[in-house]
Image (spheres, rainbow, N blue to C red):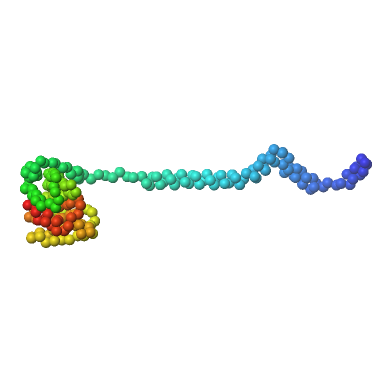
Amino acid sequence: MPNKYNEIMSRVTVTSDMHERIIDNIRRADLDPKGYRLQQLFRHNKRAMSIAVCFLLLLTGAFVTTQNLHQSETVQPIEQVPGPVLGVPYITEYPSVQELATGIGFEVKEVTQIPFQVRQTDYSSVSGEMAQIHYSGADNSLMFRMSPGNNDISGDYKQYNDTKTISLKDERVTIKGNGGKYELAIWQSNGFSYCLSTEKGISEKDLMLTVQSVQ
């Protein structure tokens, strides 16, 4: 057997080129098992690492965008311009119409005909400029207001379906209500503004009789 091996090996001829290729292949070969495992691990995790890098870039971009938005949304302080401050209207009560007139500085008229039985009458002024008298009954109530000027002093901003303007002597009275029942009457006379308002609607006739009774 050794003779056969020696005979075969004696016929094998290795040229210098073949020798160089063999040595070069040995050098390139990765004979370290640990290194081979690291290469394989890197190949398997290469995709996961790429995804992680992309996610990190997205987070960085979102953070920068959020910071820019916060900066752009920062509310700049508004410079306050000096000016008049509107006060809250105050009510002053009086025991009688005479004392109300004295306190407010002009003669205050009264309602002499009211379409329900009056149980209580209250006299007051609003911010020292407008006189008001409140008539209370068992089933209804009425507010009478009077103030110098030509303005709507009712303070009633409700929407009404029925609105009429009626001529009464030298004045024009605007009445408002719903379904044939009226709750509000507004008019001006001799430099003063007037208003009548009821808690519950009454007929046009009763409201106009009430307006005519103001004296």
Front residue of 153 and 201:
201
Q: Position of residue 93 (x, y in %)?
A: 13, 41
Q: Is residue 32 left or right of residue 212?
A: right
Residue at (22%, 58%) from the top-left corner? 178
Q: Is residue 184 visible?
A: yes
Question: How many discs mark residues in the rendered view?
Answer: 0
Q: Position of residue 131 (x, y in %)?
A: 12, 47
Residue at (89%, 47%) from the top-left corner? 11
Q: Position of residue 107 (x, y in %)?
A: 6, 48
Q: Is residue 125 visible?
A: no
Q: Is residue 51 left or right of residue 23?
A: left
Q: Is residue 81 left or right of residue 195?
A: right
Residue 89, located in which quarter of the rendered image? top left
Front residue of 151 and 51:
151
Residue at (8%, 49%) from the top-left corner? 109
Q: Quadrant of the N terminus?
A: top right
Residue 76, located in which quarter of the rendered image? top left
Front residue of 211 and 3:
211
Q: Is residue 8 left or right of residue 156?
A: right
Residue at (14%, 45%) from the top-left corner? 119
Q: Is residue 183 above or below residue 27?
A: below
